[in-house]
Image (tube, helix red, strand yellow):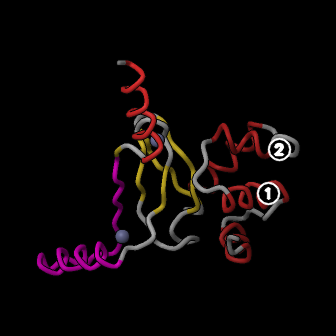
């Protein structure tokens, strides 16, 4: 679960408070990250109207509490790296599923080396891998077989 005290402080510094709706949105996001707006709206529909979900997400984005992952012309919302551990995404271009990567040490080492080689002080990086997830690959093979 997201560090709510930290969110509260960030909001307070911007003269906002941690309302019930804001807590609920953050809860849903930390349990189901990343989420499409559509799904977030559905998950909170009983308590919050659509317009306030959009407003709150905009606020969270401005305060760098959440970030958007762009998939083509669509996007999904996740907690920003200030609030979740560093990770990379594997994005399926067929079903839009996003898998968070876990084993990073090799990639992180190479990125640091690359920065060092260029005397560059690296602070942050993003790396998304676009492709086809294993479920969609299986489906494609099945469809190919039934085509024959
Ligand atoms: Zn897929
Ligand atoms: Zn990384």
Quadrant location of residue 16?
Answer: bottom right
How crowded is the residue under tag 1: few (<14 C-alpha within 10 Å), some, or many (20+)?
Answer: some
Find numbered disc 1 in the image and state the secondary structure of the residue it sits on: helix
Residue located 79% across and 46% down the image: 44
Q: Position of residue 25 (x, y in %)?
A: 74, 54
Q: Give the residue pinned by disc 2.
A: 48
Q: CA distance from mark 2 to mark 1?
A: 9 Å
Range shown magenta: 105-130
Figure check: 104 above or below 26? below
Instruction: List the single residue furthest toward the top.
Output: 148
Mark 2 in CB contact with mark 1 (< 8 angstroms): yes
Find numbered disc 2 in the image and state the secondary structure of the residue it sits on: loop
Figure check: 118 above or below 47? below
Quadrant location of residue 147?
Answer: top left
121 is within the stretch colored magenta: yes
Task: Look at the numbered disc 1 and say if its residue's Cβ is closer than 8 Å to ligand 1.
Answer: no
Quadrant location of residue 55?
Answer: top right
Residue located 77% across and 45% down the image: 43
Which one is earlier in the sequence, the residue at label 2 or at label 1? 1
**Residue 104: which numbered mark, if any?**
none
Left or right of 123 in this view: 30:
right
Task: Look at the numbered disc 2 and say if its residue's Cβ is closer than 8 Å to ligand 1.
Answer: no
Q: Give the residue pinned by disc 1.
A: 24
């Amino acid at each position: 679960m997201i560090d709510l005290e930290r969110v509260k402080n960030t909001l307070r510094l911007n003269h906002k408070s941690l309302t019930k709706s804001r807590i609920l949105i953050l809860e849903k996001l930390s349990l189901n990250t990343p989420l499409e707006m559509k799904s977030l709206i559905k998950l909170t529909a009983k308590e919050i109207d659509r317009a306030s979900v959009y407003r709150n997400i905009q606020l969270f984005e401005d305060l760098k509490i959440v970030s958007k992952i762009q998939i083509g012309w669509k996007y999904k919302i996740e907690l920003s790296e200030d609030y979740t551990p560093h990770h990379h995404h594997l994005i399926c271009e067929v079903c839009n599923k996003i898998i968070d990567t876990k084993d990073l040490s090799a990639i992180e080492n190479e990125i640091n080396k690359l920065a060092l080689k260029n005397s560059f002080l690296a602070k942050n990086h993003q790396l998304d891998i676009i492709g086809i997830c294993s479920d969609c690959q299986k489906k494609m093979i099945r469809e190919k077989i039934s085509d024959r």
